[in-house]
Image (cartoon, rainbow, N blue to C red):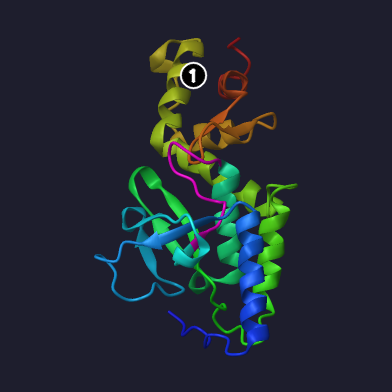
């Protein structure tokens, strides 16, 4: 973890930092305070903190953290939020943020409230980050490529989690010679399924993906493997 910059000492520095954090608040970021009986020292950039160790703060003077509007979990948020977390980490570094986590895959990013970023003595980076967060109100995706890469990764991971079973089951139903005639080369089945050009992967939660053209992909797989003998 990097050492944070010194707290701004001039009134101009302090006012500039405070204005930037007010802009974050206006952009939908949430004020948080840390449960004092669990943490006796101020939370620093780069640290990891459980959601159970923080709670909502009503006033800026009570806030110790400000959570960016990119949080998600297995049951909340979206794939865009998950991709935005990755884009922010890639763009600004893990040690810029306080990392929040909790049950059911809950994930979020926060900043120590009212403090300069690490290695940002001239306060050049924080305004850029604030601009990025403000733009989310009009365009929710920080990095289109990061979003596409995230969804593609979920699609790849789905094979071992559940998709292989569904594909094999669908393929057996289309096999012209019954189950005994189905090919057993998992690699060929997987490559052919994912190679179907009409596949349309969409997320139904922040962490799960489905192929809207699954039935067509399985039919394509059957035609390819069975040389057109299956419907």
Region in magenta = 66-78
State whether residue 27 is above or below residue 175: below
Say how many tags the image has. 1
Q: Position of residue 4 (x, y in %)?
A: 49, 83
- Residue located 44% across and 72% down the image: 46
Q: Is residue 76 magenta?
A: yes
Residue bearing mark 1: 171
Quarter of the image holding residue 217?
A: top right
Residue at 52%, 88% (x, y): give it: 6
Does residue 27 belong to the magenta stretch?
Answer: no
Q: Quadrant of residue 13?
A: bottom right
> Magenta residues: mostly which secondary structure?
loop
Q: Nearer the viewer, residue 218 or 81?
A: 81
Image position, residue 79 (x, y; %): 56, 42
Question: 71 or 25, which is in the foreground?
Answer: 25
Q: Which quadrant: the C terminus?
A: top right
Residue at figure coordinates x 69%, y 51% from the top left: 136
């Amino acid at each position: 973890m990097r050492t944070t910059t010194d707290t701004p000492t001039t009134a101009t520095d302090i006012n500039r930092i405070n204005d930037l954090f007010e802009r974050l608040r206006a952009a939908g970021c949430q004020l948080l305070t840390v449960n004092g009986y669990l943490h006796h020292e101020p939370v620093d950039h780069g640290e990891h903190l459980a959601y159970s160790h923080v709670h909502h703060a009503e006033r800026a003077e009570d806030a110790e953290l400000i959570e960016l509007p990119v949080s998600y979990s297995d049951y909340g948020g979206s794939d865009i939020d998950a991709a935005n977390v990755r884009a922010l980490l890639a763009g600004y570094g893990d040690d810029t943020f306080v990392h929040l986590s909790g049950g059911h895959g809950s994930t979020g990013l926060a900043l120590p409230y009212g403090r300069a970023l690490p290695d940002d003595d001239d306060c050049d980076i924080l305004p850029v980050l604030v601009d990025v967060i403000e733009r989310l109100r009009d365009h929710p995706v920080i990095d289109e490529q990061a979003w596409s890469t995230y969804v593609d990764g979920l699609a790849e991971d789905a094979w071992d989690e559940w998709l292989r079973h569904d594909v094999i089951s669908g393929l057996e139903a289309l096999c012209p010679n019954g189950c005994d005639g189905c090919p057993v080369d998992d690699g060929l089945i997987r490559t052919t399924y994912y190679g179907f050009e009409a596949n349309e992967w969409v997320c139904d939660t922040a962490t799960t993906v489905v192929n809207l053209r699954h039935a067509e992909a399985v039919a394509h797989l059957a035609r390819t493997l069975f040389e057109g003998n299956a419907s």
